Amino acid sequence: MRDALRSEIHKTVETYCTEPTQRETMLRALSRPGFALHPEAKCRIGLLTLEVHRAIQGTLGTTAFRAAIATELYMEAAFMFDQVADHELDQADGLSAAEELALAIGLMSCGAAAACEAALQASSDGRGFRSLLQLHRDCIASSSGQFLDARVQKLGLGTTDEALRITCLKSGSIGRLATAFASNIATDEPQTIKLFEEFGFNLFTYMQLVDDLRDACPENIPLTDLGQHKKTLPVVYFSNFLAEDATVTNSGIMSPDSGEPVSQEVRQRFKASGAEVFSAIIAETFLNRAKSNLAALRDRAMMVDGLEQLVRSVEFNPNEIIAVS
Amino acid sequence: MEITKLEKTVRQAARDGSLGSTLATPESKDDAGLNLSPEFDQATKTLAAKRRVRRHAATTLLNTTTARWA
């Protein structure tokens, strides 16, 4: 199923991106590690979209696939933007930041085209337009997260409340984008839609918090979130922890320049600060909420077996590719 | 409960060197296990208390904060 989804993504880009140079560059970019057309790509947001549709309607048809292509391409566009924002351009392609951003806009537009196709196919009784409206609301929420994330990078210390809010906006909104679009296309029942929206929001917030926990200060990896002074939840917690520590003077315990490797002393202080415990508790809360959403959906006779399998794969086998049969 | 309260609790426990005993509670049904994933285990491997963090405390933690953002 994942291969079918990837094939359809390829066809969509070929169909809508008519300028040959841009099209070929875009397809090459989508084949990079971490992107949808890479052989090891997980395509989680597309598969999540398919599973939500199947949970409601019991089958997967063309409409579900068009919706999945749309959400996956939106995700790819956001990911590409992130790489530019984080100065992580792919050296192999030799593309400039401006070229990458132009590709990101192109990807998002291809996603919008696929979304319109899905909405058109589900256009009876206005369901299609309602789903498109919600999709774009979630896009705006997610872009708000990216904007605030970029803004706080240049400001001083934030609060953990702010860090979590940005994580929710940026990543939770992407998850909600997928589950809201799929459920709005597949049903008219408001409470069911609401539960699916919450599920996507909670699941993707959890996944982002786990990523941030993993990337904060990993061993044997020089480029850490801590070293780059990223304003993720564990890094903000640790920064505040240091700021309130009377034994720490402003002598540069944090590496003074963003991008510098963190010292062993800082690593040890980070481990001892409770940043990991704090972040793990928050992340676990969102996972519990996602599971609670699924339990409520099962009570509403939704066929959530595939979604439960997806959650298990995220929770216990984060590196495994989810097989949607 | 807002996350700043949890932040203060964890921070104080870290300073006191009592992170495990502060967050852990006696074994009970509520504490049946946070069941942290392998990825959590990897990320939080230094923290012996992680499996005894109270599930219900974590679950109720964000009720007010995320409601505010909804």
Image: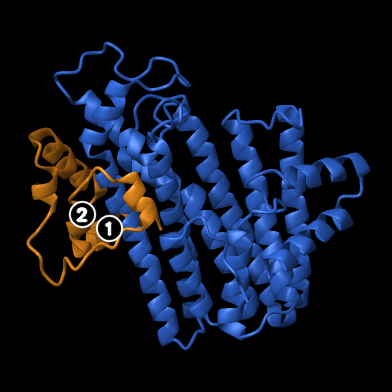
Disc number for residue B1 = 2
Q: Which chain is orange?
A: B
Q: Residues within 10 Å of mark 1 (few under 14, many from 20)?
A: few
Residue A246 visible? The answer is yes
Locate residue A134 relative to residue B52 in the image: left or right.
right
Residue at position x 21%, y 34% from top?
Answer: A272
Residue A188 visible? The answer is no
Marks 2 and 1: CB-CB under 8 Å? yes
- Chain identity of mark 2: B
Q: Amino acid at mark 1?
A: Thr
Cα distance between the residues tagged 2 and 1: 6 Å
Residue at position x 40%, y 86% from top?
Answer: A299
Q: Which residue is mark 1?
A: B64
Q: Which chain is blue?
A: A
- Image location of residue A219, percent across then percent down: 38, 33
- Image location of residue B65, percent across then percent down: 30, 54
Residue at position x 37%, y 55% from top?
Answer: B38
Residue at position x 20%, y 65% from top?
Answer: B56
Label 2 vs 1, first from the N-terminus = 2
Q: Amino acid at mark 2?
A: Met
- Image location of residue A49, percent across then percent down: 61, 68
Element marked by disc 2: loop
- Chain identity of mark 1: B
Q: Nearer the viewer, residue A299 or B23?
A: B23
In the rendered view of the protein, which quadrant contains the C terminus of chain B? bottom left
